[in-house]
Image: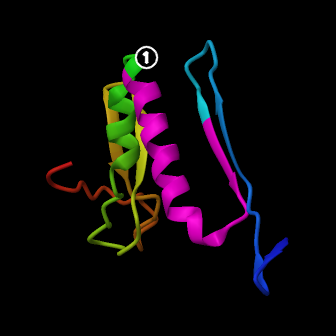
Amino acid sequence: MSWRGGEALMNYRTTYQVMMSTDGHHRVTVTIEDPGGTDAALAWAKATYSRLLKANGQAELLQEESLEAPECAVHFSPMERMQGRLGPFWSCHQKNRDGSWCSYKPKGF
């Protein structure tokens, strides 16, 4: 902390780190001390991560990560995105009263 004209000035530090991996699992990390700068730091991290995915031909991962989980119309709980042998799908992980697994399929996903 430093002082100027009788008021305290806070010297906050922000650290940006980009870790690139040969297996395509890149990481973007922001460490921030100033709570007021959180929105700007988060926007920078998201934009940087998006550029990394696009540069490596992984833009479809960005689209899948941004999807909001639909709600099961039977159990009113968030569904989980699963990877099946025929591709990704949404699944409700709740059981019905008869003990069978929920088979609800959301429309438009």
User: Residue 93 placed where, x, y %?
Assistant: 46, 58
Quickly name the residue at label 1.
Answer: 56
User: Residue 37 placed where, x, y %?
Assistant: 57, 64
User: Residue 70 placed where, x, y %?
Assistant: 30, 61
Identify the residue shown where x is 45% and y is 52%.
43
Instruction: Please state if 65 lies on the left or on the right of 87 as rendered.
Output: right
Q: Amino acid at mark 1?
A: Asn
Instruction: Establish if 67 lies above or below 6.
Output: above
> In the structure shown, which secondary structural element does the residue marked by tag 1 occupy?
loop
Instruction: Establish if 57 lies above or below 53.
Output: above
Picture quadrant of residue 101:
bottom left
Numbered range of the magenta stretch? 28-54
Identify the residue shown where x is 42% and y is 74%.
97
Q: 93 and 44: which one is in front?
A: 44
Q: How is the image coloured?
A: rainbow
The N terminus - image quarter = bottom right
Find the residue positioned furthest to the top: 22
Identify the residue shown where x is 64% and y is 18%.
21
In reply to whether residue 22 is colored magenta, the answer given is no
Q: 68 and 22: which one is in front?
A: 22
Instruction: Please state if 12 lies on the left or on the right of 66 as rendered.
Output: right
In reply to whether residue 33 is colored magenta, the answer given is yes
